[in-house]
């Protein structure tokens, strides 16, 4: 599919202070990690893969073609970096999946006969409910 090591080289990381409530320590530590990936300038993917990723990730990309992911789930910067990298690889793998073309199956003759028979039975049942014609 693609080379994960080469893709890791193209990623840029930025650490910043995490949002939310905290004690004295939270104001000193940059535990939130932001991952930035430039899809347009990537050398790992060929043109076909890039167009597929642009189409699949279009609502996640900026106007410049940057994919930005953030993680501040953990108190540890290293753990957050690991989590955001895993999330990034999952997103890329899902984006590169080519769906199988659906081949419509033929309706069996027995199913068609069964449907027509049930329609005929229902029609006869409703016809028998009518008052008889005495002419």
Image (cartoon, rainbow, N blue to C red):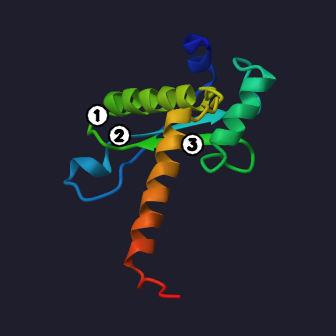
Label 1 sits on residue: 76
Which quadrant of the structure image shows residue 7?
top right
Asked if the residue under mark 1 is in contact with the one under mark 2, i.e. CB atoms within 8 Å, the reply is yes
CA gap between label 3 and label 2 equals 17 Å
Q: Residue sitting at 35 percent across and 27 percent down?
A: 78
Q: Which mark is residue 31?
A: 2
Quarter that holds the N terminus: top right
Label 3 sits on residue: 68
Q: Residues within 10 Å of mark 2 (few under 14, many from 20)?
A: many
Q: Residues within 10 Å of mark 3 (few under 14, many from 20)?
A: some
Considering only order in the chain, which callout, 3 or 1, is on the residue closer to the N terminus? 3
Where residue 118 sits: x, y (%)?
A: 44, 53
Q: Residue sitting at 35 percent across and 40 percent down?
A: 31
Asked if the residue under mark 3 is in contact with the one under mark 1, i.e. CB atoms within 8 Å, the reply is no
Task: Kindly give the residue lying farthest to the left in the view shown.
Answer: 23
Task: Kindly give the residue lying farthest to the front in the view shown.
Answer: 135
């Amino acid at each position: 599919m693609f080379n994960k090591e080469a893709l890791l080289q193209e990623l840029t990381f930025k650490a910043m202070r995490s949002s939310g409530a905290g004690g004295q320590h939270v104001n000193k530590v940059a535990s939130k990690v932001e991952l930035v990936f430039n899809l347009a300038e990537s050398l790992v993917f060929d043109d076909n893969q890039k167009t597929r990723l642009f189409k699949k990730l279009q609502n996640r990309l900026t106007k410049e073609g940057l994919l930005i992911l953030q993680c501040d789930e953990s108190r540890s910067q290293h753990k957050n970096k690991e989590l955001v990298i895993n999330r990034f690889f999952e997103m890329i793998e899902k984006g590169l999946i080519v769906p199988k073309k659906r081949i419509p199956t033929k309706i069996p003759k027995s199913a068609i006969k069964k449907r027509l028979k049930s329609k005929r039975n229902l029609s006869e049942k409703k016809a028998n409910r009518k008052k008889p014609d005495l002419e």
